[in-house]
Image: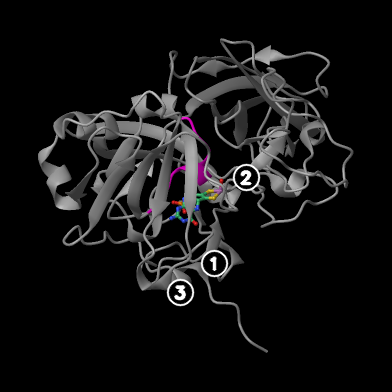
């Protein structure tokens, strides 16, 4: 029988305990206890990997050479241009800490199980990217998107015969779009898109195109598979319904008109302590975790419940204000010896929160799960 290679064998420098969801393309999930062990920032050894398309030779957490890498900027822009990646080093650098989360994160919590990689909750991390803002590059080159440009469409490199990987996001994302050259203060790991990745803070993982080779301003969304029918959820367009609930297990005839892409990250929170199945000392029990949204408005509260959601108790947020990174929260509960279940639910300033029953958002590919997390543990 063939042995499944471990994560560190598939990607040099990754923690051996990352869960191999797929070898080709490479998909590695961060075990939840390891994610929780680094509540401030997710180190490169632990950060999940999701490739739809592998780039041959880029399976390492080491940086990738800038030499010879070029970026083409075109489409609906008054002055298309090509730039050498190393020229980016001479432009003003900007830093952003953001949640990088696969839109399939939490998929295995949907019932029945949708198609796709069976992510638990470990397809996520909190990382700091540094690089050049796309708008600063445009300004430096004296180029402007035309009025017809409604989307930014990014293409990954096809070197080594890689299949195409293309994603489009709304032009609004130009405000924060960053051509990232480093992550967590080190050269951007090759497996995470080095030497250059176009990141969109507040947007789901899929939109953050690794190994970016071409950026186009376009009138419409791209029509390749990663934009349609994949990475979308059913909705009623031009309404503010976040998703159109489906009969779990059913099929949906995705079109541009009856669905929307996995763009903005929805409100979510995770409980990092206690962990599922743990036994902790009582009666005072520290409960903590993280919460995040799309960064457009602040997270304003996280509440926890130990009675199945009948009553809720406010946790303390580590900081306030808008953020693309996650915010830590904590509280102390008084609990009797025995078994308990704690739930956590985040709210943002726009009144957006998480469904108690995450299955409400069931969709056939299992995207955008943000149901309230429940953890069972024992107080000694
Ligand atoms: N990019 C490219 N180039 N390719 C691929 O495949 N994928 C996606 C992004 N980008 C890709 C890209 C996805 S899908 C995700 S999540 C992300 O990425 C991840 O990241 P990392 O770094 O972690 O690996 Mo889902 O929504």
Q: Is residue 206 left or right of residue 85?
A: right
**Residue 111, position as x, y percentages in the image:** 84, 45
* Contact, mark 1 vs mark 2 (Cβ under 8 Å): no
Q: Which residue is mark 2?
A: 231
Query: Disc 1 designates what residue?
Result: 25
| 112 relative to 276 in the view: left or right | right
Q: First in sequence: mark 2 or mark 3?
A: 3
Residue 249 location (% of width, % of height):
88, 47
Viewer can see residue 335:
yes
Mark 2 vs ligand 1: CB under 8 Å? yes
Magenta part of the chain: 202-210
Q: Residue at x 66, y 37 (%)?
A: 256
Nearest to viewer (mark 3 / mark 1): 1
Q: Against 356, is 33 above or below?
A: below
Q: Quadrant of the C terminus?
A: top right
Q: Is the residue marked 1 within 8 Å of ligand 1, measured from its CB?
A: yes
Whole-percent x, y for residue 192 in the image: 39, 54
Q: Which residue is mark 3?
A: 9
Secondary structure of the residue carrying tag 3 is helix
């Amino acid at each position: 029988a063939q042995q499944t290679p471990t994560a560190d064998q598939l990607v040099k420098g990754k923690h051996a305990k990352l869960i191999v969801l797929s070898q080709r393309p490479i998909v590695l999930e961060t075990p939840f206890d390891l994610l929780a062990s680094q509540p401030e920032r997710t180190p490169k050894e632990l950060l999940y990997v999701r490739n739809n398309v592998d780039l041959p030779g880029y399976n390492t957490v080491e940086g990738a050479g800038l030499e010879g890498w070029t970026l083409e900027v075109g489409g609906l822009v008054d002055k298309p241009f090509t730039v050498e990646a190393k020229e980016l080093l001479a432009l003003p650098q900007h830093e952003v800490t953001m949640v990088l989360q696969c839109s399939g994160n939490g998929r295995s919590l949907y019932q029945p199980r949708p198609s796709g990689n069976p992510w638990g909750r470990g397809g996520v991390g909190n990382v700091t990217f540094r690089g050049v803002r796309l708008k600063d590059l445009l300004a430096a080159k004296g180029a402007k998107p035309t009025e017809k440009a409604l989307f930014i469409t990014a293409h990954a490199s096809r070197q080594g015969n890689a299949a195409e990987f293309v994603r489009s996001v709304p032009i609004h994302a130009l405000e924060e779009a960053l051509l990232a050259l480093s992550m967590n203060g080190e050269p951007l790991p090759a497996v995470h898109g080095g030497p250059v990745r176009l990141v969109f803070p507040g947007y789901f993982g899929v939109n953050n195109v690794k190994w970016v080779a071409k950026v186009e301003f376009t009138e419409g969304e791209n029509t390749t598979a990663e934009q349609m029918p994949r990475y979308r959820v059913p909705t009623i367009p031009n309404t503010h319904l976040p998703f159109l609930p489906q009969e779990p297990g059913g099929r949906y005839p995705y079109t541009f008109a009856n669905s929307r892409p996995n763009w903005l990250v929805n409100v979510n929170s995770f409980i990092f302590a206690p962990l599922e199945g743990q036994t902790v000392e009582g009666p005072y029990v520290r409960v903590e975790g993280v919460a995040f949204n799309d960064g457009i408005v602040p997270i304003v509260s996280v509440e926890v419940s130990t009675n199945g959601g009948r009553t809720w108790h406010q946790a303390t947020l580590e900081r306030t204000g808008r953020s693309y990174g996650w915010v830590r929260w904590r509280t102390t509960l008084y609990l009797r010896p025995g078994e308990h279940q704690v739930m956590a639910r985040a709210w943002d300033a726009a009144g957006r929160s998480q469904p108690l029953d995450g299955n409400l958002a069931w969709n056939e590919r299992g995207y955008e799960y943000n149901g309230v997390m429940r953890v069972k543990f024992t107080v000694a």
